[in-house]
Each structure stands twice: as structure tokens, then as C-alpha cells.
Image (spheres, rainbow, N blue to C red):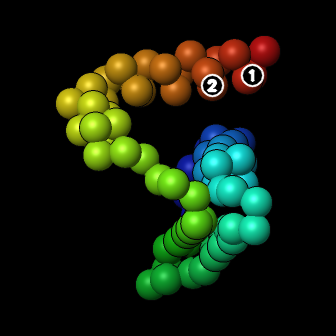
Amino acid sequence: VTGDAGRLRQLALILIDNAIKYTPSGGAVRVLCQREKGRAELSVEDTGPGISVDDQKQQRQQPHKLRQQASKQWQSARR
């Protein structure tokens, strides 16, 4: 996989942490990492409530704000 190993690791940890955090007691979290056609594929599935339709719409409408927030979080995590 080509990319920044630190950021890829951080992304994987965030996805797994969120899945665990938002899955109710007795629920399940499934993490799968595999090679597919020369590429790495990471899948994180859970039985949590998911993201509401309204929040999904907001995320699609404001992707630049989400990128700015993620960038700020990344910079804070590196300090």
C-alpha cells in the first residue's frame, strides 16, 4: 500500500474505535483487511445505530468543513 503509514494507521484506529464506541452492549464489530487486486481493503462493520439521514446529508453538503476538522484533529494528535 502506498501512503503515509501513520495516517493510514490513524484512520484504521479511528474507524475501529468509533465502531466499538457506538455499538451497544451485546452488539458486534467486524474488521476485515484483505488484499484485493493488488490493493489493500479495510472494512469496519458494526451493529450500532449508524449515521442519521440528516447527518449524512450535512456531511455531503459540507465536505470542506469535515476536512478542516479532520486536519485540525490530525495536527493536534501529532503534538
Separation of disc 2 and disc 1 at Cα? Answer: 6 Å
Residue occupying the point 49% across, 20% down: 69
Going by the image, does 59 lie left or right of 48?
left
Residue occupying the point 56% across, 16% down: 72
Q: Quadrant of residue 29?
A: bottom right
The residue closer to the viewer here, 66 or 71, is 66
Residue 78 disc label: 1
The residue closer to the viewer here, 52 or 44, is 52
| Residue 22: x %, y % from top left | 64, 49
Residue 1 in view: yes
Going by the image, does 50 lie left or right of 11?
left
| Residue 23: x %, y % from top left | 66, 56
Is the residue under label 1 in contact with that under label 2 (CB below 8 Å)? yes
Going by the image, does 8 lie left or right of 54?
right
| Vertical position of residue 49 compared to residue 67: above or below | below
Looking at the figure, which quarter contains the C terminus? Answer: top right
| Residue 8: x %, y % from top left | 63, 49
Residue 74 disc label: 2
- Residue extending furthest toward the bottom: 37
Name the amino acid, label 1.
Answer: Arg
Looking at the figure, which quarter contains the N terminus? Answer: bottom right
